[in-house]
């Protein structure tokens, strides 16, 4: 029955049509008595003549009128006009959930809000013994102020009559077992089979609706109605972790439990369901300052490490001077696992963070997490490290990983965020980034000991005998910023900038540690995290002219990984500790706590077994680090001088160590009285290790000249030019007591012993590729 504006239905005056429902038409009307806008639903003439449908309409009126809840459509009145019954309800301004879903998935935060409203509405109905039986996006309305309303209880069945306030809620929808009721795709298995349904049927339908809100796809949609019904009975929908990477694990579990085929395994009431969702949404992002203590991260892959991702609202700090109270940043912690987050990026929506991490001693994996809810979801990808995320949702990954002291490298591969098999591109890649076009890559690659920066792929714009990390393409797409490390495997360095023509500029002085870099909002500054001898890791900004300012100072170590378009920064807060421990050969007891600060790396044990040498990178040791001597009798450690990877002389009186100056030197440091010496290394541009020959007069050095791979040299401690020793692709690590045999590593991956007399090498069986021979017995 079509009604024109001005038509009177008792005290209700029709204003305009709103649309057609399943059993009639809906109009905007005016309640002339109370001067309020209402909605009038009038049954069509065809339905009005159908006794069964008329009973269903009357049942809806009685059912909903008995409910008084903010998440259920409120019924004001019922009546009849020219033989056609009508129902008067509150007028809702907004749109149905179906209309909202036409734009795609709703995201976790909004889905959680709407799901909680639906669950509360169902719970209110279930308390009155009412089952909806036709829950679907068309029957959920979202008002303009975000209020959720459950509509259309026309298929409801009163399963538990209740008497209250002198009125009996009575009757059935007069449906019998064997009759299928509901809407295809949202019905529960028991509804499909025509069996008796109860509150748990609504919970199954609820799960299907929430699944669609999260993914934009129907859980059981098939080409035909018969296939859809079969899917409801037999099939499981695709895992949420497979269809979208933004769904927290807690929400995944709630949806999975709602969609259980067996009613006994579902939530048993909407009240329980609402409690679960409320608990989920109640554990949202915690705003707090990250809990960090330690300063420096050396060998993060080998250390006992704890790391956390945090988003800091640093936009307010830009242009301000720290520490004014109004510029204090707000931190939102995103991860709570034990392990090491290697890299992270904001997704295009600004609320999803994609990152790679080693959690709880598991292999490196890629995860995603929403800023508003700190529950990470693993992306279905093989073991890999995140390098970059494009605006189009493509991931650049490093697979087949090799771990170094301060970075990792691997095969550059590209894959869609939704998952699949990564497409391998280049080997030996350390860092990469997508240009703003979402397609062009810039990457740093180790090629035979020389690290080259390419942008676009195939065009080399910078190279170094050190290494390049944290490669970031400028928002303009015309320049690449990066952390420039002059010594391979050492994280000291400076911020550099290079354009597409290969013109390189150094923007900062050298820092003892430089880890983390990103372009700031607008592309006028580069933000980076660095530390020197006097300070722990700080966030700095440098503009394109080299002017530096401090952005954020906080206790402990931070690492900046990305900056969103609105100025929020993505940071890690990290705590590392390297431990030195040993076993007393006399007693067999373990001895722990032999380290000094938080960056102690064992170098050597004295010939008599009573003392150790180690390189210390923690504390305030500076960019050249500290050679440290410690007796095992419990006495305090003693700093001997600058250097790293120290070794005892055969008589135990002197330490030899590599000094990471440019060019490098070898330090000879007396254990007791005496003067230290430094030996220049001639043409050697990079030095990695030093060892003693048993005569105490010669040194074995692993190094390389500019642009050449590492090899082995012999040098007289009295001075002179180092002489190449052994094969060109072999690096010696330990000299035998006879002075004639040297153990070392071949570039092919084998451990080999080189005989100085025969000039031949013999492979040592049973040594793993990642192992390094330290000493001869």
Image (cartoon, rainbow, N blue to C red):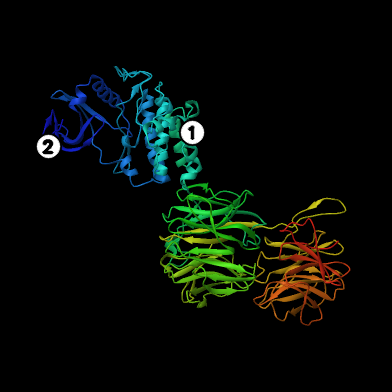
Percent coordinates x, y for residue 391 in the rendering? 43, 59
Taking the image as shown, residue 466 lies to the left or right of residue 29, namely right
Quadrant housing the N terminus: top left
Crowd tier of the residue under label 2, counting other residues whose Cα lies within 10 Å: few below 14, some 14–19, many 20 or above? few
Is residue 732 visible in the rendered structure shown here?
yes
Percent coordinates x, y for residue 363 in the rendering? 62, 51
Q: Nearer the viewer, residue 251 or 20?
A: 20
Helix, strand or loop at disc 1?
A: helix
Percent coordinates x, y for residue 364 in the rendering? 60, 53
Taking the image as shown, residue 467 lies to the left or right of residue 147, namely right
- Identify the disc placed on residue 5: 2
Q: Earlier in the sequence, mark 1 or mark 2?
A: 2
Percent coordinates x, y for residue 775 in the rendering? 81, 63
Q: Quadrant of residue 50?
A: top left
Q: Are marks 1 and 2 in contact (CB under 8 Å)?
A: no
User: Which residue is under mark 1?
Assistant: 257
Q: Nearer the viewer, residue 699 or 391?
A: 391
Whether 41 is drawn above or below 418: the answer is above
How far apart, in angstroms, are the residues tagged by discs 1 and 2? 48 Å
Helix, strand or loop at disc 2?
A: loop
Whether 408 is drawn above or below 90: the answer is below
Q: Quadrant of residue 138?
A: top left
Quadrant housing the C terminus: bottom right
């Amino acid at each position: 029955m079509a009604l024109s504006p001005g038509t009177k239905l008792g005290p209700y005056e029709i204003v305009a049509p709103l649309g057609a429902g399943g059993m009639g038409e809906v109009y905007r009307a005016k309640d002339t008595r109370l001067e309020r806008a209402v909605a009038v639903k009038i049954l069509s003439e065809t339905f009005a003549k159908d006794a069964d449908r008329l009973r269903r309409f009357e049942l809806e009126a009685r059912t909903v009128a008995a409910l008084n809840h903010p998440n259920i459509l409120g019924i004001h009145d019922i009546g009849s006009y020219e033989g056609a019954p009508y129902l008067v309800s509150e007028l809702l301004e907004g749109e149905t959930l179906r209309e909202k879903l036409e734009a795609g998935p709703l995201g976790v935060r909004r889905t959680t809000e709407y799901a909680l409203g639906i669950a509360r509405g169902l719970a209110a109905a279930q308390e009155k013994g009412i089952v909806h039986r036709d829950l679907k996006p068309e029957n959920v309305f979202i008002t303009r102020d975000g209020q959720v309303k459950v509509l259309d209880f026309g298929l409801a069945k009163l399963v538990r009559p209740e008497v209250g306030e002198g009125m009996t809620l009575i009757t059935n929808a007069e449906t019998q077992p064997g009759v299928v009721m509901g809407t295809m795709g949202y019905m529960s298995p028991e509804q499909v089979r025509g069996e008796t349904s109860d509150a748990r049927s609504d919970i199954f339908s609820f799960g299907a609706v929430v699944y669609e809100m999260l993914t934009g796809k129907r859980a059981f949609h098939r080409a035909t109605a018969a296939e859809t019904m079969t899917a409801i009975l037999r099939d499981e929908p695709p895992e949420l972790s497979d269809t979208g990477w933004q769904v927290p694990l807690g929400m995944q579990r709630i949806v999975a439990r709602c969609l259980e085929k067996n009613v006994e395994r579902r939530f048993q009431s909407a009240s329980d369901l609402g409690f679960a969702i409320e608990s989920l949404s109640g554990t949202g992002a915690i705003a707090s300052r990250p809990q960090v203590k330690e300063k420096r991260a050396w060998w993060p892959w080998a250390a006992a490490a704890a790391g956390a991702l945090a988003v800091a609202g640093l936009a307010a700090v830009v242009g301000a001077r720290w520490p004014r109270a109004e510029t204090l940043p707000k931190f939102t912690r995103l991860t709570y696992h034990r392990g090491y987050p290697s890299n992270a990026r904001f997704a295009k929506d600004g609320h999803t963070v994609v990152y790679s991490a080693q959690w709880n001693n598991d292999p490196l994996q890629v995860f995603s997490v929403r800023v508003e809810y700190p529950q990470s979801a693993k992306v279905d990808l093989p073991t890999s490290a995140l390098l970059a995320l494009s605006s189009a949702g493509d991931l650049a990954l490093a697979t087949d990983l090799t771990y170094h002291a301060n970075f990792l490298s691997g095969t550059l591969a590209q894959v869609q965020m939704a998952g699949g098999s990564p497409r391998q591109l280049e080997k030996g890649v350390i860092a990469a980034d997508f240009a703003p076009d979402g397609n062009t890559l810039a990457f740093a690659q180790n090629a035979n000991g020389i690290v080259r920066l390419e942008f676009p792929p195939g065009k080399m714009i910078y190279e170094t005998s050190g290494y390049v990390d944290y490669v970031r393409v400028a928002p303009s797409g015309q320049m690449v910023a990066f952390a420039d490390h002059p010594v391979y495997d050492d994280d000291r360095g400076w911020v550099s900038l290079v354009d597409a023509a290969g013109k390189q500029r150094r923007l900062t002085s050298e820092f003892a540690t430089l880890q983390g870099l990103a372009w700031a909002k607008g592309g006028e500054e580069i933000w980076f995290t660095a530390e020197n001898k006097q300070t722990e890791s700080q966030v700095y900004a440098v503009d394109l002219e080299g002017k530096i300012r401090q952005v954020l100072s906080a206790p402990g170590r931070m690492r900046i990984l990305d900056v969103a378009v609105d100025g929020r920064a993505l940071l890690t807060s990290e705590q590392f500790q390297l431990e030195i421990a040993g076993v007393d050969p006399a007693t067999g007891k373990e001895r722990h706590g032999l380290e000094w600060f938080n960056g102690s790396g064992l170098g050597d044990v004295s010939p008599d077994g009573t003392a150790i040498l180690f390189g210390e990178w923690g504390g305030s040791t500076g960019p050249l680090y500290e050679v440290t001597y410690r007796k095992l009798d419990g006495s305090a450690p003693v700093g001997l001088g600058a250097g790293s990877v120290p070794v005892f002389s055969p008589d135990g009186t002197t330490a030899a160590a590599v000094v990471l100056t440019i060019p490098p030197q070898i330090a000879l440091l007396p254990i007791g009285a005496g003067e230290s010496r430094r030996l220049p290394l001639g043409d050697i541009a990079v030095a990695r290790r030093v060892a003693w020959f048993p005569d105490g007069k010669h040194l074995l050095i692993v190094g390389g000249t500019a642009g050449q791979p590492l090899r082995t040299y012999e040098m007289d401690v009295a001075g002179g030019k180092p002489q190449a020793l052994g094969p060109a692709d072999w690096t010696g690590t330990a000299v035998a007591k006879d002075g004639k045999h040297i153990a070392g590593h071949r570039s092919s991956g084998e451990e080999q012993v080189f005989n100085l007399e025969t000039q031949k090498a013999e492979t040592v069986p049973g040594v793993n590729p990642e192992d390094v021979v330290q000493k001869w017995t």
